Image: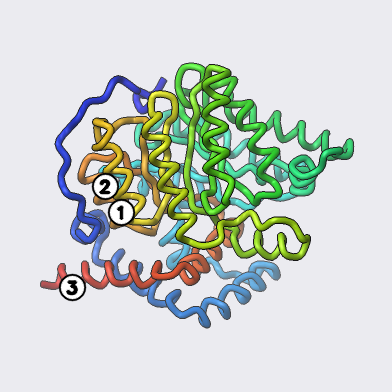
Amino acid sequence: MKNILNCAPNYYTPFAMLNFNNTKTAFSIKSDRDLKRAFWMYKLISYPILVKFINPMIKIASAIRFPINWIVKPTVYAQFVGGETLQECIPVVEKLKSGSVYSILDYSVEGKEDDADIEAALEETLKAVDFGAKNDNIPFAVFKPTAFAKSKALEVMSTSADPDEESIREGEKFRKRVEKLCERAFQNGIPIMIDAEDSFYQEFIDKIVMEMMGKFNKETVIVYNTYQMYRHDRLERLKQDHQTSLKEGFYLGAKFVRGAYMERERERAKKMEYEDPIQPDKESTDRDYNLALKYTVENIDRIHVFNGTHNEESSMYLTELIKENNLQKDDKRIWSSQLYGMSEHISFNLAAEGYNAVKYVPYGPVKFVLPYLMRRVEENTSVKGQTSRELGLLKEERKRRKL
């Protein structure tokens, strides 16, 4: 079992006031050249019209196999991706750890429908589990469920009371692949997180993940499920899952994110005339997100918490909950995470104050990771204040260094 799973009793330690605006700490591992690249990267994506033009062009170029690596790799790829292979990510992992921030290597190749592609993704993710288990700077493994199943089967198994035989067979293949990954993680003693998907896939995924927790989380948390708190039913589902874990005698692993598929979830619900699964407004999402953090920290003896957010208020609130419940800052049952290349002011300032901070570091060949990169660019453009916040912090640090 890796040291990262040490869950010895925790005691109160002194707490300093956190300052997320400390750019010296936030960008401590970045060279002047890194800062300049990041600044101009965010400057470009601050223009929505430009992003709307570039994204389709990149997709077309990729589809016709036009060579674009020369422009993508040193720019947006270098900003948001660790490397093309596990081994290529090592310098990034070591550099992050020099700032006391850990890494999660995420094979970010989009899920495909062909069995051969699915099996290839499975083998690569198994390698990532083994790779992470041998490196103390990599405390978790992770995978995206749609990489290991045909989307139609996940949808039918999640939404139909009477699934067809083909979907049942594909669903069983998915269950076996997930079990293989969780078993490998269990054997290696490294926790593994299962990302969330669209609501019309999630019910079947939740069922399988709870089954895996019941099997592998008897002594500590190996398997984590992900709760997208922009869904109005997730806080109640969290509480139900907790009660199930108590009844069946296993630990619950809970990773929280706000969510990633709001626009298409709303459009689909409207088109197919069913209840919109998304919260009515951002305030409701923020409320449930923080209530979920409160619930889990107050039940930390049976739930391990992974706070996956770029939201400063939720990040600060978690530190307050740790203090209120007389827990150590570095309690290994509580982690905070941001994506590589984003929100450095949260990750590195948390780490500098002694909290457990980890970066999601995507990896994979440039041409296969392009969809992921395009989503990151679009996310920074669409999320209110995200790009301007990043730009403001980068500008402030560049100014500080010049002075």
Is label 3 or label 2 in front? 2
**Can I make out residue 251 in this image?**
yes
| Residue 340 or residue 78, whichever sits in front | 340
Quarter occupied by residue 104: top left
Q: Secondary structure at mark 1?
A: helix
- Give the total of numbered labels: 3
Quarter occupied by residue 7: top left
Q: Calculate the distance from the C-alpha at mark 2 to the C-alpha at mark 1.
A: 6 Å
Mark carried by residue 169: none
- Circles 2, 1 touching at the beta carbon (< 8 Å): yes
Across and down, in percent, residue 11 comes to 22, 26
**Can I make out residue 128 in this image?**
no
Q: Left or right of 112: which side holds 94? A: left
Residue identified by numbered label 1: 346
Q: Calculate the distance from the C-alpha at mark 3 to the C-alpha at mark 2.
A: 23 Å
- For label 1, count other residues whose C-alpha is less than 10 Å away and answer few (under 14), some (14-19) or many (20+): many
Residue at 51 percent across and 17 percent down: it is 218
Residue identified by numbered label 3: 399
Coloration of the structure image: rainbow
Q: Secondary structure at mark 3?
A: helix
Quarter occupied by residue 121: top right
- For label 3, count other residues whose C-alpha is less than 10 Å away and answer few (under 14), some (14-19) or many (20+): few
Name which residue type carries label 3. Lys
Residue identified by numbered label 2: 350
Looking at the image, is mark 3 or mark 2 earlier in the sequence? Answer: 2
Q: Left or right of 145: which side holds 298? A: left
